[in-house]
Amino acid sequence: MDDIREALMLGRQSDGKPVRRPLSPHLQVYRPQITSVLSIMHRFSGMALAAGTLLLVAWLVAAASSPAAFARVQGFIASPIGWLLLFGWTAALYFHLLNGIRHLAWDLGCGFEKPEYHRSGWMVVIATAVLTVLTWIVGLAIW
């Protein structure tokens, strides 16, 4: 019992019998659900948007700096890695937008029933995929 964490793990059952508490009971008890997965993905998409915005800023600064700097950044963006980053940024943008709209509906008190939040969650996922692919199809067709 030298360590306070060890003392915090000790507990008693309802009949008074000593028992060791698990460190993270939620990991043993709960399965991932659409609401928890989309909540975590909403945070990740926010981080991806921040990183993608840095790439956009680098592109704009390079365009304002010199033709050589712009060519260097444009070359990176036109590479397969750059296209993959842009595709991911597009998906993150749509996901964050659509899931944010879903959260606004929740703020209004709508969509808290189990069938409703399952349906709205899957609608966010499907609409994200469809809008991302459509954006790239239209963008590549125009380009």
Image (cartoon, rainbow, N blue to C red):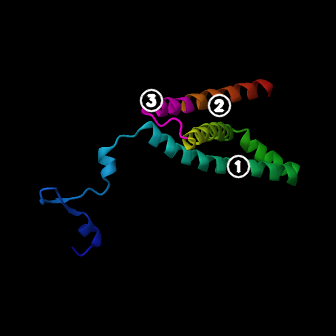
Amino acid at pointer 2: Thr
- Magenta region: which residues? 109-124
Q: Mark 1 highlights which residue?
A: 53
Mark 1: amino acid:
Thr
Is 104 a magenta residue? Answer: no
| SS assignment at label 3 | helix
| Secondary structure under the numbered disc 1 in the rendered image | helix
The residue that mark 2 highlights is 132
- Identity of the residue drawn at 49% across and 29% down: 119
Above/below status of 43 relative to 141:
below
Image quarter where the N terminus lies is bottom left
Q: Quadrant of residue 106?
A: top right
Q: Is residue 129 left or right of residue 113?
A: right
- Mark 3 vs mark 1, foreground winner is 3
Q: Residue at x 62, y 26 (%)?
A: 130
Question: Relative to residue 125, is residue 71 depicted above or below?
Answer: below
Real-space CA distance between mark 2 and mark 3, rounded to the nearest whole angstrom: 26 Å
